[in-house]
Amino acid sequence: MVDKARFAFTEMNPQLGALSTLPYLPIVLTYQNQSLSVSGLLDTGSSVNVLPYEIGLRLGAVWERQRLSVPLGGNLARFEARALVLIANVEQFPPVELAFAWTRDRNAPLILGHMNFFLAFDVCFYRAESVFEISPKRVFQ
């Protein structure tokens, strides 16, 4: 089994070139029997994973059935958010459960943050090369 994978940063604005590159990770999210391929922004400044409203709906989640409210800060503080646990597949690595703050903000990006993406994966950024590496955390028993 390969223990790490390397990804290029994604250029967001061709006019700005390297100044607009960000670490977006291709990931497959699954809720119940519904899966969706998306890209999530690796955000070391985010305390939680954030799931945009539309992605939750496309996965078949029902807002009214999610009872646990999650407070968000920053630009998302004015929007209601509820907890939603999804299965995440990254590359060839074993699937992991990720807890998301599913926000009503329809314009929010999918964010992968400390709780609990960075608890499940180690990430090394090589900003000068515009790449990053990811590997699942080893579980010792």
Image (cartoon, grey):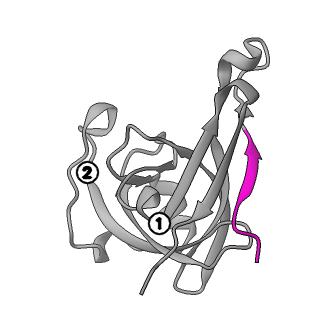
Question: Residue at point 32% right, 38% down?
Answer: 76
**Residue 41 relative to residue 76: left or right:** right
Q: Quadrant of residue 95?
A: bottom right
The location of residue 100, given as percent across then percent down, is 39, 62
Q: Secondary structure at mark 1?
A: helix
Q: Amino acid at mark 2?
A: Glu
Question: Residue at point 66% right, 21% down?
Answer: 20
User: Closer to the camera, 16 or 78?
Assistant: 16
**Residue 100 relative to residue 10: left or right:** left
* Residue extending furthest toward the top: 15
Mark 2 → mark 1, Cα distance in angstroms: 26 Å
Residue 80, numbered circle: 2
Q: Quadrant of residue 2?
A: bottom right
79 to 103, vertically: above or below: above
* Quadrant location of the N terminus in the rendered image: bottom right
Point out the stretch of residues depicted in magenta. 1-8
Residue under label 1, please give it. Answer: 120
Q: Is residue 3 magenta?
A: yes
Q: Amino acid at mark 1?
A: Ala
**Counting other residues with Cα less than 10 Å from the Cα at mark 2, is it few (<14), some (14-19), or many (20 or more)?**
some
Question: Residue at point 23% right, 57% down?
Answer: 70
